[in-house]
Amino acid sequence: MDGSLSVYAWEELISDLAESLGDAGTALRFAFAESNAIYRAELDRSRVRQCFAELSSDAFEIGGATLARYRLSETDNDFPFPHATSAFHYDRMIVASSRGVHGAHYDPSSQDRTDAVRLSPLGANQAWPAYGNVAIAGGTEGLYQVDLKIKDREWPPEHVGDCLSERACDACDWMYSNIIGMSFDEGSVLARFSQATRAGMPITDPDKVAVSDDGEDAPETSRRPGPVDHLEDLIRNRYDAPGRRPLTWGSRDKIYKVEGAYLAVFRLLSDGRTPFIGKVPLPTSLESVVSIKTSLFGLVFEFDESIMVLTSDGQSRVINGEPVNWRVFPRSRRYENHLHVLREDGLEIFSFNHDVEQNQFDKLIGTRVPTNWTD
C-alpha cells in the first residue's frame, strides 16, 4: 500500500510448491508457470490430465511470510500510483495513469530499473505496447499511439502522441499490427496499419488466411498507417437498431459485437476483410459491464460486484466480489492462461487450462495461439 515495487521469483515459488505435491505437481507447473508447454508439445496432454486428476485441491494459498522468502528486490516507486495498467515490452516497463504514460528500462537479470520518464502527458485509461509502439486509450481525448524508438535505445521526447481517432476511447488493444479503440458510448474504431520489414518488403502471411502475428516482437518491423474504420460500419447488418452504435471490441484475430442476447464473432483477414464466423449466446446481459478484455482462454467481463469469464470452450464462470483491479496476460509466453484479481486483502491468480483442447482456428471465443507455438 506504500506504492513500492517488489520483484518475486515466481517460477521458483511454483516449482517448490509443485515439488511438494509429487507427480501431481506437473499440473501445478503447467497451470501457473508453463502454460504453453502443451501447445508446444513439450508436455504430454494425457499425462497432464492425469496429474490434474491427482491433485487433492484446486486452490492453494501463499501467505505473506512464505512469499517474502521469494522476494528478489524491493524499490521505491516513482511511477504515478495507483496506475491504470502496466506492461512490459522488450526491456521497458510501461505504466498508464491519469497523470500520463510513463516508462522505465528494466533489467530482468539484476532487477535494476531506471528512473521513470513521462512519455506522454495524456491521461490514459490503458496503455498497451507492441511492435515498438504504445497504444493509448485516452478517454474523451481519443485513441493515440506513441513510438517508443526501440532501435534508438533512448526514450523519445515527451509528446502527446499521434491521434488515431477523436472518438472517446475507454480501452484499447492490438489486432496484430492494427490498433483497436473501444468505446461504450461513441462506437469503437479499428486503426489499420500495413506491416513491412526494414527492407520495405511486405511480411508474408504463413497461413494465408488470418493476419499474422509475425513481427510483434521484432524491432526491424515497421508499420505504415492506413485508414481508420468505424466498427459499426465494418460489421453492420440489417438487424442493427437505427441510430445506435453496438458494443464492439476486438483483439488479435477476432472482433466481437453484442447483438441482443448473443455475441457475434468476426475474423480479421490479411486482406482487411472481416467475415462473420459465428455467434454464441451470452450468459448474462452486458448492459452494466464496466470493462472487457480478450485473452487466449476467453473473454473477461468486469461488473460492479463481480467478474465473469466466458471461456473458449463455451462455458462461463462468475467470480464474485468487487475487484480493486484485475488483468490478463494475452501477450505473455508463460502466463497467458492467468487471470489476476486484486482484492483489498490479497491477490487471487486464476488459471484456466481448457484451451489446449480447442481447435485454435475454429474457436469463436478467445484469441488463437501464435503460429510459431505449434510449428
Image (spheres, rainbow, N blue to C red):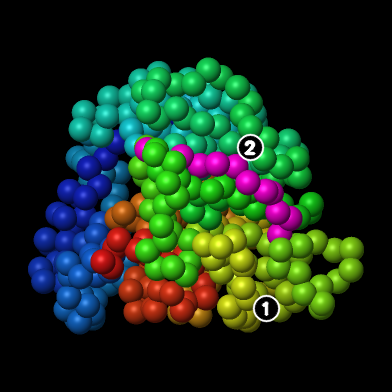
Above or below: residue 162 compared with residue 287 = above
| Residue 291 x/y as whole percent | 63, 55
Give SS at disc 2: strand
Dot 2 or dot 1, earlier in sequence: 2
Give SS at disc 1: strand
The boundaries of the magenta stretch are 220-231
At 71% from the left edge and 63% from the top edge, which residue is drawn? 234
Above or below: residue 92 compared with residue 36 = above
Q: Residue furthest right?
A: 243
Q: In the shown orientation, is residue 28 left or right of residue 134?
A: left
Question: Foreground residue, 221 or 364?
Answer: 221
Tell me the amino acid under the disc marked 1: Tyr
Q: In the shown orientation, is residue 321 left or right of residue 27?
A: right
Q: Residues within 10 Å of mark 2 (few under 14, many from 20)?
A: many
**Magenta-span inclusion, residue 224:** yes
Which one is closest to the eye, mark 2 or mark 1?
2
| Residue 286 x/y as whole percent | 69, 67
**Where is mark 2, residue-wise?**
144
| Residue 117 x/y as whole percent | 48, 20
At 17% from the left edge and 75% from the top edge, which residue is drawn? 44
Q: Give the Cα distance between marks 2 and 1.
A: 31 Å
At 73% from the left edge and 74% from the top edge, which residue is drawn? 259
Q: In the shown orientation, is residue 38 left or right of residue 213?
A: left
**Where is mark 1, residue-wise?**
262
Tell me the amino acid under the disc marked 2: Tyr
